[in-house]
Structures are given as C-alpha cells and as structure tokens.
Image (spheres, grey):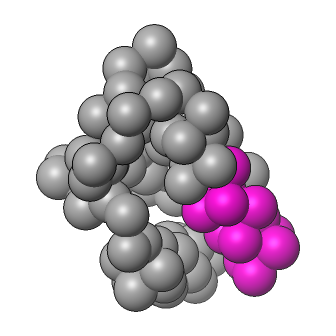
Amino acid sequence: MKVAVCRITLRLHDNRSLKGKRHVVRSLIDRLRHRFDASVAEVGDQDRLKSALIGVAVVNGGARHATDMMDRVVEYAETQLFEADIVDLERELIDLD
C-alpha cells in the first residue's frame, strides 16, 4: 500500500475575515474531495486571515498511480485558486508494504 501525502500552504489575496477565508478554503477542499475522492482537510493556520494550510492524502496499491494522482490534485488546485496562491508545497510518498 502506498500513501501519497501533500501539504499545501496558501496565501489569500485581499481577505479581511475568517468567514471569507473559510469560504475560499472550504470551496477548494470540497472540490478536491469530490473530483479526486482524496482525503483533504485544513490542517493549520486556522486563526490566520491571509494564509491556510491544507493536507491531502491519497491511498493506492501502486507508487506510480498514487504519485500521478497527487500530481493531478496539485495541478487542479493551482487552476482553481483565484483568491489565493500556493506559496509552499511539500510532498511525500509513504510505502506501507
């Protein structure tokens, strides 16, 4: 079993409230979950207005497929973010065999 994990750090543009931040982050999380059937959650920076930290995990039997799927998740996130930029990205592939 292979687990691909990714931590995405976002910088939000012109955000003035936690409500506005939640709207942007929740929208992205919901779209990633729906499109890729991945585990996605806001994992940090919940009290900051201008940044967000999102964790994504994908489980698969093959390393190549798990890595390819995570590549598609990141690419999709980059194309869907209009109110934020990805400023940092950390990936890891965990082999649990």
Q: Does the magenta stretch include residue 18?
A: no
Q: Horizontal and vertical percent for residue 97?
A: 64, 49
**Percent x, y for residue 63?**
52, 72
Q: In this view, does 86 lie to the left or right of 36?
A: left
What secondary structure prevails in the magenta region? helix
Q: Which residue is drawn at 17% across and 52% down?
A: 87
Residue beneath the point at 75% across and 81% down: 35
The residue sitting at 60% across, 62% down in the picture is 28
In this view, 6 is above or below 45: below
Res. 56 visible in picture: no
**Residue 33 colored in magenta in the image:** yes
Q: What stretch is highlighted in magenta?
A: 26-37
Rendered view: 24 above or below 75: above
Left or right: 25, with 1 as reference point:
left
- Judging depth in this view, the residue of 60 and 17 nearest the camera is 17
Vertical relation: 17 (above or below) 9: above
Classify residue 93 by image quadrant.
bottom left
86 in relation to 65, above or below: above
Residue 88: image x %, image y %?
19, 49
Depth order, front residue of 52/72: 52
* Residue 59, image quadrant: bottom right
